[in-house]
Amino acid sequence: MEQGTLTTLEKVIFLKSVDIFKHATIEELGGVAALTKEVHFEPGETIFREGDPIDAIYLILKGRVAVEGNEQVVREVGEKQAIGTVAALDLKPSMHTVKAIDPVYALKLNAQDLQDILSQDFELVQAVIRALCQLVREFARR
Amino acid sequence: MRFRALTINVRQFLDVRAGEAARIGLMAGFLFFLLAANNVIKIVRDSLFLSRFPITQLPYVYLLAALLASAVITIYSRYASRLSFSQVILGSHAFIISRLIVFWLLVVFYDFGWVLYAFYMWSAIVGLVAVAQFWTVANDMFNPREGKRLFGILTAAGTLGGMAGGFGANWAVSFLFGTKQLLWLIVGLFAGAFGVAWYAVRERETVLGANQRENIPPREVPARDRDGVVRTLYNSRYLQLIAAVIFLSVIVSTLIDYQFKAAAKEAYRSTDALAGFFGSYYAWLSVITVLAQLLLTGRLLMGVGLTPSLLVLPLALFAGSIGLLIWPGLFAATATRLAEASLRTSVNHSGVEILYLPIPDFVKKKVKVFLDVTVERLGDGTAAFIILFSILVLGGSGVSLLSYFSIGLILIWAAVVFVVQGGYMEALRRGLAYREIALKEVRIDYADKGTVEAVLKTLEDKDEQSLLVGLDLAEKLDPKVVAARLPRGLLQHSSPAVRGGAIKILALYPDATTLKALTQMLQDENKEVQAQAISAACAIFKGDAITVVSPYLESPDPQVKRRAVECLLHHGDEVTRAAALNSFRKMVNDSTAEGEQGRVEAGRLMGEVYDPEFSAHLGRLIREDESLPVIRAAIAAAGMGKYPGVVRDIILRLGSNTTKAAAREALIEYGEIAVKELRTALFDSRVSRDIRLNIPRTLSKIHSQSAMNALLGGLLEEDRSIRFKVILALEEMARRFADLKVDREIIESAIMSDALLYYRRFVLFIALFGHQEKSLGHGESLLYFALTDSMDRVKERMMWLLSLIYPTKDIRRFWAGLNSGEPNKQADAIEFLDNLLTGEIKEYVFPLFTDAPQAQRFRASLGFFGMGTIDTESALRALLEQDDMWLRAATVWEIGIRGLTGFRDPIAEFLDSDHLVLREAARRVIHGI
């Protein structure tokens, strides 16, 4: 995948497949897509470091990343998954270090931009809350 | 292959859906055997009894049967509650079979007259118990929606059984053996019912397990649920109403049955002729019942609803009774009896069964047999008394006179039907409520004595934050109470904020300690405390404070200066007021960065003190000042002082994240004054969308009819996001301000407009995607999701709009049930909505939520636009013409995915579109094609 090649609609299609945005309409996702930019990480490159303030959500288009805590891999995150979501929403430092395992292509969504668009679009807020509630319910069921 | 196709066609015709065939098949077979046996029992019973005894003996049998029913029900209830459900059903059938054999022995070998009495009474009770048990199983196996759709099939199967029983008995008597040997046919039919019941009760357990319905074993039932049947009935008005419907209908039915049998005995003297007549009657009855069942039941219940369906039988009998009075004789009696028997076992029976659906399982199990057996027998008994009264007191056979009683009872029956409908809705509401957690708004009562004590307790704390919170709360309490008990030590607290807060409260009810502390605080090194002290001195001494306060006009601290200006403007003479205003002007006109705090304080001052001159200052600060704190302070001040000239300036601040909260609060403070400007801005397309999006919520918090009307006007807004905000705002407003009038016509028109939008989308969706279930990935259908999202949003808007014209709680319960993800709760919710909505709104809204098959909904949706069908190409062309840019872009993308070269020209037109997304999509697709 080449960088900077996705059209807005392709970004929307991708965003629709990411958990946190799955309840948003394509119009709302169009607004989000316009705020994203494509980024690339080499294998082993650090995306977040534990305790660092989070300035963006990364939505993985291709590749895998390792989420580490206490210098151990806690879990792997792959395509169509997002990293940094919670920290970007509550503006707290990262709980984990995140490193690229493969060459990683992702959409970067600036945390402040997300906050701004949420503050302007009530229906998008509802969609995100609904997705978060669903995640909480799934987590509670486990 | 042909058989499979036939099976599918039959299932589609009967509206049997996937997973229902086995259940409906078993239950249909069960009822077929039961009603076949029931009819044969009646033929044997009537032929033997009427050929041996005079018609006047019949009322005594009715009475004895009623008495026997009480004994039977007591025994049945005692044993039924100790046994499992399957034991009760299967045990009852085994018991019936064994008793039939005993009766055969008695009838054939002994031929005692009392045996015929006993058989008549026994058969009347047995048939009812078995059928009541059947419907208990059926109610467990089908939810309300399935019941409405499928109970017609069940009763049709039962009627076919009755027909087979009638014809079979007639044929057997004519060609095989005598009437008494028919008892073996009944044994065979009950044996068949037993066999099917064996599988049916197992299927029921599977269904109950899957639905997680309550099926509490007797030992686990709470004490309050073990109340007797009578107490349960006593405590439930709804059950009493069902009982009344059954009771009245049975009395009328028995009166008509008596009139029919008397006419038959009169017309046919010999036993053979009588048996032949009954054979024909039962056969034709079954045919008419089947027709009524197939052609009327479903259509009436689904088409006109429960109440009209329950009224069909009483209306028919009303006409029949009039007919019997005008043309007494066998024809009128048979016609009325045929109408009674066919409608009672088809339309009326299905309707009454639906009345049982919202009743909890454990209650239903307890009362249904009682209502179906004891109440019916009581009805028979009451009818018997009426007949005896007619014969013994009024004289003659009393046959025609009975019609007068019937007419009177039918009128009462119809009235009860109207009342029971309300009970049904309430029971459904309760059923839905059990599954919902109600969130109650919490309100803090500041006048509460406990709250005062708790607040004063926090003021004994040493922690500064706790004290500040306590002081904030104390300010909201009754100052007279709080000031007297406020700890004086707070005036010496190390925190200036605490000292300032304390003096503020104490100044409202000063004492010697306060005055001493005040003198010290006017010299306090902390400017905040000094400012509070000025305000306190002003509040206590009023005009006498001018001398003390005036020097502070020269204070370098803006806070102190503002308090001094404020005091002098309130209590000063002309000279001191002019000096104060000069001081104020210096503050408000200092546009330097250093003057920022001065402008903030000037802003606050303008909120505290009203002066016409301030309006111009406020407008300038709100429009032009570069400092956010200044703008916010000016907005707040404008709201406090309700300066009319700056409303428009405040509205224009609604579009910014940094100022919208302050602007909204200020506009709410303005109240009615701001509505006109807010309304103008809401409908003005030249005003920024960000601003307009924030207007509905602001209007919703203003308690005035004009604000409500402004929002109602917003329902016609083309921008869907703004309209959605308007809908949410209206819902909130209607909930908060119940005294305001919601224009029902406007809401209904908005609902219908949205419903049509939904049907348009749905038609296009089905034309393009049919029954596909999509999951997204690169290159997959964005249009699929664009359309489903759009339809979901319409439904959501609809829910909010409905809550404006129907009880909000009901609509929320419906919505919660519909979105529960559990088929049973969803069916309950749809059933609830079916009964809640009325008139034209129901025609438009209900099909959106109905559980009818997709193909049926597609046809109905096409019907709204007078269309017969639509193909894929037409659907795509229609979508390309939509105003919604995103929908058009998704359609272009879809055309690309499908590789439809015929669309090259219309897509090429988008290459120069003003919209980037549409341009990008067209470019990609043209390139791909």
Image (cartoon, coloured by chain):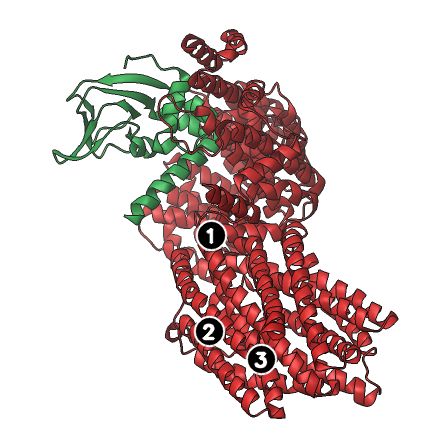
Chain colours: A green, B red
Comparing labels 3 and 1, the label whose residue is closer to the camera: 3
Question: Residue placed at 60% from the left, 44% from the top?
Answer: B846
Q: Position of residue B419 (x, y in %)?
A: 68, 64
Q: Position of residue B711 (x, y in %)?
A: 64, 35
Q: CA distance from mark 3 to mark 1?
A: 33 Å
Comparing labels 3 and 2, the label whose residue is closer to the camera: 3
- Identity, as a three-letter code, of the amino acid under mark 2: Asp
Question: Residue placed at 51% from the left, 67% from the top?
Answer: B134
Q: CA distance from mark 3 to mark 2?
A: 32 Å
Comparing labels 2 and 1, the label whose residue is closer to the camera: 1
Question: Residue placed at 49% from the left, 7% from the top?
Answer: B911
Question: Could you tell me which quadrant the N terminus of chain B lies in?
Answer: top left
Please, what secondary structure does the residue beneath circle 1 have? loop
Q: CA distance from mark 2 to mark 1?
A: 32 Å
B148 w.r.t. B339: above or below: above
Q: Which residue is mark 3?
A: B123
Residue B809 visible in this rendered orientation of the protein: no
Q: Which residue is mark 2?
A: B225
Q: Earlier in the sequence, mark 3 or mark 1?
A: 1
Q: Earlier in the sequence, mark 3 or mark 2?
A: 3
Q: Which residue is mark 1?
A: B20
Discs 3 and 1 lie in a common subunit: yes
